[in-house]
Image (spheres, rainbow, N blue to C red):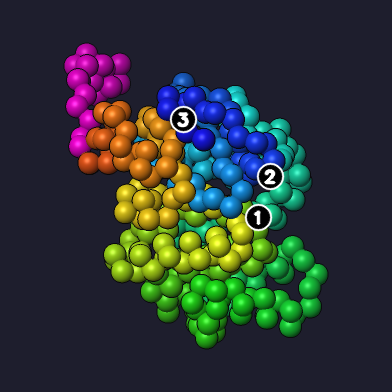
């Protein structure tokens, strides 16, 4: 599947874990997402990338059911989420893992207790089973033996891996990872990228990664979606995106600033509150 200018060739519906069609979002009168289309296939890593203000975070919030769009369709694991009740969305989220940018661990709990939390909230498993499951997930992210530590005792990379372990504890079918490489040095970032690839293969998950880190995106993506000012510029493989002839795509890849004309009258109006 390949798309430019928001035109997407349909895939077999049974292959899809996410299908977004004509998604539009406004904050007040300002349009944030403009007719966004995207698809995520079973077992693939889709990377959503774009510059600051491109709409990445807003799109992620919609995919997680945290915001309602102005219009459009979002299907997650076969469910149309735009009209789901809170209870139905809550049930759907049990099949979804989310690894937040900073780990989002509770500072008053040990690493193991943080990882165990979703199982305590959503299952009736016995204590020993929960502990065994948390140790397994910590081993998967190379944090075996660190469960007794507090979050404040972990490095930035360890915090991200601990957050990842918590997102995996319920064996999700779909994993969202927000800015996995942000704030990490190149070596730790590369290790985390490899971990994401290993987890996808080991757990047969579909993974959506939101990032602005080009090296990381190119290393892990099966396909990429490039956003700019709320619109999809291109969807394709790493090579297809790298070889795109669209000027704005090349601007983003080569970190060239947008050359915009300034409307002096509008600028003065904003300054004066007019």
Counting residues from the N terminus, which is met first, the one under dot 2 or under dot 3? Answer: 3
**Which residue position holds label 1?**
173
> Circle 3 sits in a helix, a strand or a loop, which is it?
strand
Q: Is residue 14 above or below residue 109?
A: above
Task: Report whether 63 appears left or right of 238.
Answer: right
In the picture, the quarter occupied by the C terminus is: top left
Task: Report whether 200 appears left or right of 156.
Answer: right
Residue 86: image x %, image y %? 73, 43
Residue 250 falls inside the magenta stretch: no
Q: Please tell me in which quadrant of the rendered image residue 253 appears.
A: top left
Q: Please tell me in which quadrant of the rendered image residue 128 appears.
A: bottom right
Disc 3 packing (10 Å; few <14; some 14–19; many ≥20)? some
Q: Is residue 234 something that shows in the picture?
A: yes
Camera-nearest label, 2 or 3: 3
Counting residues from the N terminus, which is met first, the one under dot 3 or under dot 1? Answer: 3
Camera-nearest label, 3 or 1: 3
Q: Which residues are magenta?
A: 255-274
**Which residue position holds label 2?**
77
Alpha carbon separation for disc pair 2 and 3: 22 Å
Q: Please tell me in which quadrant of the rendered image residue 16 appears.
A: top right
User: In this orientation, which residue lies closer to the viewer: 28 or 155?
Assistant: 155
User: In this orientation, which residue lies closer to the viewer: 234 or 126?
Assistant: 234
Disc 2 packing (10 Å; few <14; some 14–19; many ≥20)? some
User: In this orientation, which residue lies closer to the viewer: 17 or 156?
Assistant: 17
Disc on res. 3: 3
Alpha carbon separation for disc pair 1 and 2: 8 Å
Q: Is residue 71 above or below residue 114?
A: above
Q: Residue at x 72, y 69 (%)?
A: 120
Tags 1 and 2 in contact by the CB under 8 Å rule?
yes
Residue 273 falls inside the magenta stretch: yes
């Amino acid at each position: 599947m390949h798309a430019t200018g928001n035109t997407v060739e349909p895939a077999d519906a049974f292959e899809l874990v996410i299908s977004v069609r004509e998604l539009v979002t406004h904050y007040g009168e300002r349009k944030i997402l403009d007719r966004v289309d995207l698809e995520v296939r079973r077992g693939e890593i889709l990377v959503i990338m774009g510059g600051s203000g491109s709409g990445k975070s807003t799109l992620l919030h919609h995919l997680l059911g945290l915001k309602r769009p102005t219009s459009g369709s979002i299907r997650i694991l076969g469910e149309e989420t735009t009209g789901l009740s809170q209870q139905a969305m809550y049930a759907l989220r049990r099949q979804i893992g989310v690894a937040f940018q900073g780990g989002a661990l509770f500072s008053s709990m040990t690493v193991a207790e943080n990882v165990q939390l979703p199982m305590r909230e959503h299952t009736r498993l016995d204590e020993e089973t929960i502990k065994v499951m948390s140790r397994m997930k910590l081993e998967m992210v190379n944090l075996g033996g660190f469960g007794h530590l507090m979050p404040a005792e972990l490095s930035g990379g360890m915090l991200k891996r601990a957050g990842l372990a918590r997102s995996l504890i319920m064996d999700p079918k779909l994993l969202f990872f927000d800015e996995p490489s942000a704030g990490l040095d190149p070596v730790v970032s590369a290790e985390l990228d490899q971990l994401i690839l290993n987890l996808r293969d080991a757990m047969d998950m579909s993974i959506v990664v939101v990032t602005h880190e080009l090296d990381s995106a190119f290393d892990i993506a099966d396909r990429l979606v490039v956003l700019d000012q709320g619109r999809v510029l291109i969807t394709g493989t790493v090579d297809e995106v790298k070889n795109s002839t669209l000027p704005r795509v090349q601007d983003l890849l080569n970190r060239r600033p947008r050359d915009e004309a300034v409307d002096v009258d509008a600028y003065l109006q904003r300054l004066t509150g007019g």
